[in-house]
Amino acid sequence: MSSMRPSAEPGGDATTGIPTTAPVSHRAPRRRPPVGRAVAVLVLVAVAALIPLLGPSAALRGTGEAQAPGTAGITALRAVVFAALCVQLGEVFATRLARRVPGAPLDRTPRSWAAYAAWAGCVAALALAAVVANGNLVPQELSDLDIGRLYDTRDGRLALLEVNAFIVAALCARSRRPASAVLPLAAVIVAEALRAHPPVEDSPLVGSGLTLVHLTCGALWAGGLLAVLRMLRRWRTSSPEEGAAVLGLYARVAAVLFAAITVTGTLSTLRRMPPSTVLDQLTETAYGRTLVAKVLLVAVVAVLALQARRRLRGTGDRVSAYVPARGEVIALGLVVVVSALLTAVPVPIRW
């Protein structure tokens, strides 16, 4: 009788005959994004890039107002500064909301973009400081820069404050307490509010206060939604209900932010354009036309937000609110770029 020896299975040990199991990967296979989604993203990026390039000339056409040199570049730089504020403040805001949701997997949050956003904001702020150093003109060569102007003028000191604040915010983002970046980012917002309302303006502190609230609420609204949607996408298979709960908390706060943005925006408009001249200046000035474009985009954002909130309150799949909310954050990105254009076009004359 011949002895039977267990045969080794594929992948087993040929010496002992003990089968071994191949390591099983628990990582979900990566799916390529649909072609339609990729095309849509490229179109939106192209539209956002065209706003600084074509927006100033389109807004100024037929108004009789002169376009300042480098308006397109300044618009793009200010868009980067505003976007950097949105991304970093939004991550801090979304993290605080997630901590209020029981069972939220805070150890599985998306990779932070805060440091990258802060360095991008620093580069943009440095480029804007170079414009100030050349007398608010785009420098053509290094010899055009007058560094002393940055320390001797109000705009120069505010520009330096933004550069340094973004550097500190980038360091905070890499520290053990990334939420501490709120303080330097608040300094950036204060600097932007003061820069937008020079002392020669009537009641500049009132205007700066309105801009301070408007910019803070706008950054939390846009940046917070982006960060929350990134969480919802990361948790869609493991913790979908927790992600929807975070989106629900955000929706409640966003309603207050929207109200504050609406009130401060209306008051700022009435300061720039007296009630008796609003209708004329909305169509006959570059500032008014840009403001109309911004209001229309905000209206689109509001419609998408209401649709997302309706799905959150429904009894069906609450995660389906991700679709209109994604459209909302895309529209908010366009609002950020148009807001940057609003700071670059000429301020309307009070008639």
Image (cartoon, grey):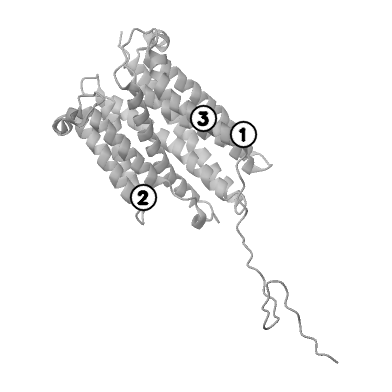
What's the CA distance linking mark 3 and mark 1? 12 Å
Q: Residue at x 72, y 78 (%)?
A: 8
Horizontal relation, residue 174 to residue 8: left or right? left
Residue 79 image offset from top left, x and y in percent: 38, 31
Label 3 crowding class (10 Å Cα cut-off): few <14, some 14-19, many 20+?
some
Can you say which quadrant of the picture contains the C terminus? top left
Q: Amino acid at mark 2?
A: Ala
User: Which residue is labeled 1 in the image?
Assistant: 36
Q: 73 or 347, which lies in front?
A: 73
What's the CA distance linking mark 2 and mark 3? 28 Å
Contact between marks 1 and 2 (CB within 8 A): the answer is: no
User: Which residue is labeled 2 in the image?
Assistant: 173
Q: Quadrant of residue 54?
A: top left
* 23 lies above or below 80: below
Residue 51 image offset from top left, x and y in percent: 43, 23
Residue 40 image offset from top left, x and y in percent: 57, 31
Horizontal relation, residue 111 to residue 136: left or right? right
**Sequence-first tag of 2 and 3:** 3
* 218 lies above or below 167: above
Element type at mark 1: helix
Label 1 crowding class (10 Å Cα cut-off): few <14, some 14-19, many 20+?
few
Q: Which mark's residue is nearer the viewer, 1 or 2?
A: 1
